[in-house]
Image (cartoon, helix red, strand yellow):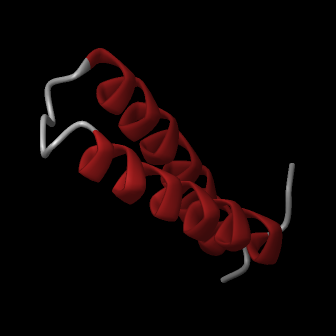
C-alpha cells in the first residue's frame, strides 16, 4: 500500500489535471473523460484516508 505522502502527491497531480480537463471541456462535468478522471481521483482520496486512519 502506498504511503500517505505518495498518495497526497498523486491527489494533487490528478486534481490539477482534472481542473485543466474541466477547463478544456468548457465546464462540462458530465463529459465521460471528466467523470472517469474524477472517479479515479475519488479512489485515490479514499486510499489516502484509509492510510491516515491506520496511522492513528
Task: Say left or right for 34 vs 55.
Answer: left
Q: Name the residue located 61 percent from the left edge and 51 percent from the top edge.
A: 47
Q: Quadrant of residue 37?
A: top left
Task: Say left or right for 15 vs 32.
Answer: right
Task: Say left or right for 43 vs 1.
Answer: left
Give coordinates of residue 52: x percent, y percent: 63, 73
Q: Name the residue located 58 percent from the left edge and 62 percent from the top edge.
A: 11
Q: Name the residue located 56 percent from the left edge and 54 percent from the top edge.
A: 14
Give coordinates of residue 12: x percent, y percent: 57, 70
Residue placed furthest toward the top: 32
Q: Name the residue located 38 percent from the left edge and 23 percent from the top edge.
A: 33
Q: Quadrant of residue 55?
A: bottom right
Q: Nearer the viewer, residue 25 or 54?
A: 25
Q: Nearer the viewer, residue 52 or 20?
A: 20
The count of marks equals 0
Give coordinates of residue 50: x percent, y percent: 60, 58
Give coordinates of residue 19: x percent, y percent: 36, 58
Q: In this picture, is 11 found above or below 34?
A: below
Residue placed furthest toward the bottom: 56
The C terminus: image quadrant: bottom right
Amino acid at each position: 500500500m502506498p504511503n500517505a505522502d505518495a498518495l497526497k502527491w498523486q491527489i494533487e497531480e490528478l486534481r490539477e489535471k482534472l481542473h485543466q480537463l474541466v477547463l478544456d471541456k468548457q465546464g462540462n462535468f458530465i463529459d465521460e473523460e471528466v467523470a472517469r478522471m474524477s472517479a479515479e481521483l475519488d479512489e485515490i482520496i479514499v486510499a489516502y484516508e484509509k492510510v491516515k486512519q491506520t496511522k492513528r
